[in-house]
Amino acid sequence: MSLSYQRLGINIDHVATVRNARGGQHPDPVAAALLAEKAGADGITAHLREDRRHIQDDDARRLMAALKTPLNLEMAAIGEMVDIAIGLKPHACCLVPEKRSERTTEGGLDVAGDLARISSVSARLKAAGIRVSLFIEPDPKQVDAAGKAGAPVIELHTGTYAEAGGGEGPELERLRAAAKLAGELGLECHAGHGLTYANVKPVAAIPNIAELNIGHFLMGEALFVGLEASIKEMRRLMDEARG
């Protein structure tokens, strides 16, 4: 059975990581985002962290001005970031947990345990015309809570699946079940974190997942083959899985 087209969002955070390691203006994450669009990206993701370890405020402003595809702004569910997002008005905001000590996002939001606050943040963003996504574990309790929080979109954390080696197994089943439940609740389902050429196809083949967001792996591959080639290969694998 042929599946519907699955969008590919490209996270350009780690172009900024390389730039910030030395300072200055190069490499420019906005230039990388424009190249990703040319290569077939359906959207661009950028995480404006509280500590500004990679994407900077000016990067976010320049992305909004330069992009033709939607910008998905990842951010912590705190007042400072909500104010910035309302000022920028990106297409979407994905609320993620954030700890200063972590190297990268280590898991999903505990929406079930923080429902009132997440609901309040979601309502502010929605009132500003911004589509809200919640980055959560593939846990039925969290999927259900995301629906109660009023967010129209969830993004399933695929990091545990990736760490388990990918492919068939309990973690893939968790993703399938969570995506199915999201569909039953009327939520659009995305997925991302730790996806590579080797493990993407089983996730891409899940019918209810409308979009994958991938960054770190593709930026690493780009060192060897170029960004355009790395994105096109991921696009090919996703299309193959959907077909």
Image (spheres, rainbow, N blue to C red):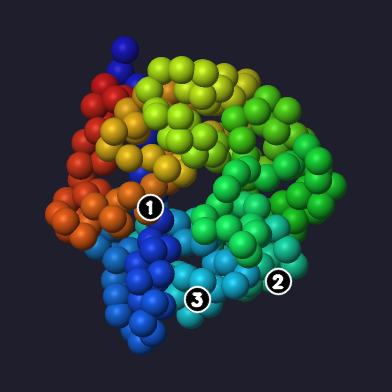
Measured in 3D between alpha carbons, the distance from the residue under mark 1 to the one under mark 3, in whole angstroms, is 17 Å
The answer to which quarter of the image holds residue 166 is top left
Tag 3 residue: 56
Tag 2 residue: 80
**Residue type at tag 2:** Glu
**Residue type at tag 1:** Gly
Residue at 40% from the left image edge and 29% from the top image edge = 165
Q: Quadrant of the N terminus?
A: top left
| Rendered view: 145 above or below 80 | above
Label 1 vs 3, first from the N-terminus: 3
The answer to which quarter of the image holds residue 18 is bottom left
In the rendered image, the residue lying farthest to the right is 116
Q: Callout 3: 10 Å neighbours few (<14), some, many (20+)? A: some
Q: Callout 2: 10 Å neighbours few (<14), some, many (20+)? A: few
**Residue type at tag 3:** Gln
Residue at 51% from the left image edge and 71% from the top image edge = 53
Q: Secondary structure at mark 1?
A: loop
User: For the residues carrying marks 2 and 1, which lies nearer the camera in this image?
Assistant: 1
Q: Residue 233's x, y, as percent?
A: 20, 42
| Rendered view: 117 above or below 169 | below
In the image, which disc is placed on residue 215?
A: 1
Q: Callout 1: 10 Å neighbours few (<14), some, many (20+)? A: many
Q: Secondary structure at mark 3?
A: loop
Q: Is residue 131 visible?
A: no
Measured in 3D between alpha carbons, the distance from the residue under mark 2 to the one under mark 1, in whole angstroms, is 25 Å
Label 2 vs 1, first from the N-terminus: 2
